[in-house]
Image (tube, rainbow, N blue to C red):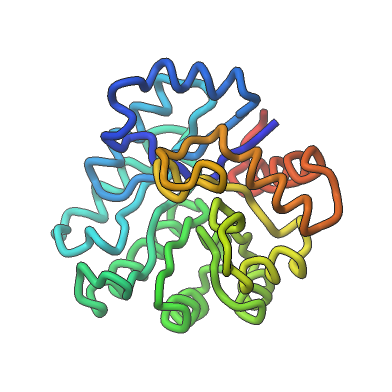
Amino acid sequence: MYFDTHAHYDHEKFKKDEAELFSALRAAGVEAVVNCAGDLKGCAATLRLTEQYDFVFGAVGVHPHEVEKLDEDAVYQLYNYACRSEKIVAIGEIGLDYHYELAPRELQKDWFVEQIELAKEVELPIIVHSRDAAKDTYDIMEDADAGEVGGVVHCFAGSLEMAKAYVQMGFYLGIGGMVTFPDVKKILRVVEEIPLEHLLLETDAPYLAPVPNRGKRNDSRNLTYIAEKVAELKGISPEEVARVTRENACHLFQVEL
């Protein structure tokens, strides 16, 4: 009954027990996963996962950390990956990261726009990464008419005002393990105030495992802890959180389960 809208199962941390883990995910009630690529190699790996596991869908794109490695053929390659399979359901993970700034800001912006335009061309939603770049991320999305395709702002940790602006633009907000961390007042307020119909559940596996597994390798089975925290904040049951966020994900990614 759970839909994990953001994971990285192509990560090396899953190489040793991939098959066993995916079997365990199904047994734990994980109905669907969107595996998000971070670079061109990750796009190929994501495509393989979608072919190998019936409940895995894919997003292809290049993370802002990796854009300095791209050349003029990258958009063509991304286009081919995006069109390769009906199980590719989004362009992502794309956006801006000024926290580590592993690529020049202007180059990050250029590739963010390029990939938004690609999403519009192939008519797929986008999965957006934004860290310490809130204003530039929003401004680029607004200027590029990203609302034409919609999508999700992954691992949302911004203000309530920014959350409302993204919802107005037609975007969902991705809620992950950080909602269970201490001292995350902004996230808690966003979850309390934004209607459940605009939220998605995600893990960002293998990163950001929720309490009580913080610091360990994350996987989609931990969605239960995220759903429980959201349910607590909303005053509803975890089952209702799982049901509505699953419906939201199916609507966004045009997936029938």
Q: Could you tell me which quadrant the C terminus lies in?
A: top right
Q: Nearer the viewer, residue 160 or 89?
A: 160
Residue 70 lies, in percent from the top left, at: 17, 58
Residue 93 lies, in percent from the top left, at: 39, 54
**In this picture, is 188 found above or below 24?**
below
**Which residue is rendered at x = 56% and y = 47% of the image?**
211
**Which residue is rendered at x = 36% and y = 70% of the image?**
96
Residue 137 lies, in percent from the top left, at: 44, 76
Q: Nearer the viewer, residue 129 or 29?
A: 29
> Going by the image, does 147 lie left or right of 84?
right
**In this picture, is 171 found above or below 13?**
below
**Which residue is rendered at x = 78% and y = 53% of the image?**
232
Residue 53 lies, in percent from the top left, at: 46, 21
**Which residue is rendered at x = 42% and y = 46% of the image?**
215
**In this picture, is 237 found above or below 23?**
below
Q: Could you tell me which quadrant the N terminus lies in?
A: top right
Residue 175 is drawn in which quadrant? bottom right
> Going by the image, does 24 lie left or right of 198?
left
> Going by the image, does 168 lie left or right of 73?
right
How many badges with numbers are in the image? Answer: 0
Residue 64 is drawn in which quadrant? bottom left
